[in-house]
Amino acid sequence: MEINGKKLADTYCSLTHMELQIRPGGIVYPCNRFLFRYRDRPADFNVSDHSVDYLLKQHEVMQTLRASMDSGTRDPGCAKCFEEEDAQKDASIRQIYNGYKQIMDGVDPEVVELRWIEFATSNLCNLKCRMCFPLLSAKMREDFIALYGEDDPTYALQKTPDLNLDNVLVPSLRHIKFTGGEPLLIKEYKDILKEAIKKLDTKKIHLNYSTNLMVAPDHELIELWKQFKYVEFAVSLDGTGKFIEYQRNPSKWETVEKITKDFLQLHREFDARVGLRSTITVYNILNVVELTDWWISAVNEYYNVPFNEYSWFNPTHAHIPDHLSITVLPKEKKKIVMDLLWEKPHAFKKVQRSWNHFCRYMNSEDKTHLLPEFRRFTKILDERRGEDFRQLCPEFSDLMDE
């Protein structure tokens, strides 16, 4: 691999040199995909004990991670990106950010400095998505108590201790990402934008939001967004109709449909870039074709650029929890998915490549041993929410049989 004239290991990841994610309670992650279940997370890897600058440059977690990835070793915490690459997805997040001109142009890729930060500092959310957990949505608390038989302090609504934004809003910053929770509900994020506008040349900074399409932006937020170079919206559109309502309870398709179209039309106000980032599980894999068709139609009608081979289209497979992964499907169910998606002709090659990626990933492992947990998990949530997986996916209904 070569970036800006420097030869680098094929496992190199710019995020290990330039980014951190801050989660509720001040917990820090190397990025939003990093899996600490594959290694211990030190208790002091947080913004209460250390500055962001120290965490990125000097903390053992980041130094060890950089040493691995810079030397050609796949760090186990980065499994999600490497899974996607092995399944020949168009590009993993690692690959996307390695080539992200807004961040990487003119930069020595081996220099360690904060160029982007992700705020996931509150678990305030309006949804309780089946593949989520309380640290990212406090609404999941009661479900987790029912599922796992005990309460936990991390299940409650949390916020991050007051941040010293002087340590975060630094001149080298080029990218700010907001997740949550649902970022459009978290008032503190507006305060961060206001501080950035005071302290920095925000026309050099672009923003990124991951949103669940059940909250529309207000006028104040739109006016703040206009002060930045551009704003990206990764929309978590996981299905059409009953599929998104089931996976992202209590979503309402009518609202999701309207707000999606509103986001696609924000380009009339400022440089707004909208892309699809669906999470594909056992629950919605059979809706992928309808979801894709609906998205392309909406883009063509409401967005400023018709859907094409360069469009932001990045659905991916769920990695956690394991029992919702499409690798759990038995052979006869995988055949149904293969018949639906594998090598199916499409007007856009990137769509066909995306569908093939799901098939390759699905067949990469046999996790049918997790079917009992899938059944238990699904049955409890169905009973609590008055829903029925058998009706959602009749083709998979016998997965619920003991």
Image (spheres, rainbow, N blue to C red):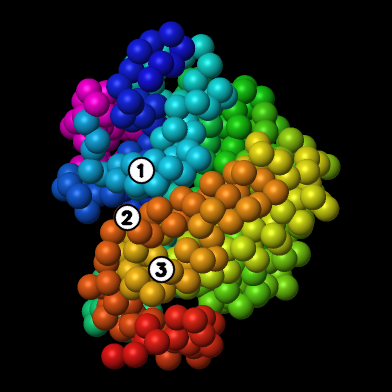
**Residue 28 visible, this orientation:** no
Residue type pointed to by label 1: Asp
Q: Which residues are magenta?
A: 44-72
Query: What's the mark number on residue 334?
Result: 3
For marks 1 and 3, the one nearer the N-term is: 1
Residue type pointed to by label 2: Ser
For label 3, the crowd category at 10 Å Cα-Cα, with few meaning under 14, some 14 to 19 and many 20 or more, is some
CA separation, marks 2 and 3? Answer: 11 Å
Q: Residue at x 64, y 69 (%)?
A: 240
Q: Residue 197: percent from the left, percent from the top? A: 63, 31
For marks 2 and 3, the one nearer the N-term is: 3
Disc 1, disc 2: CB below 8 Å?
A: yes
Can you say which quadrant of the picture contains the N terminus? Answer: top left
Residue with the mark numbered 2: 364
Query: What's the mark number on residue 86?
Result: 1
**Residue 17 visible, this orientation:** yes
Up/down of 134 relative to 304, above or below: below
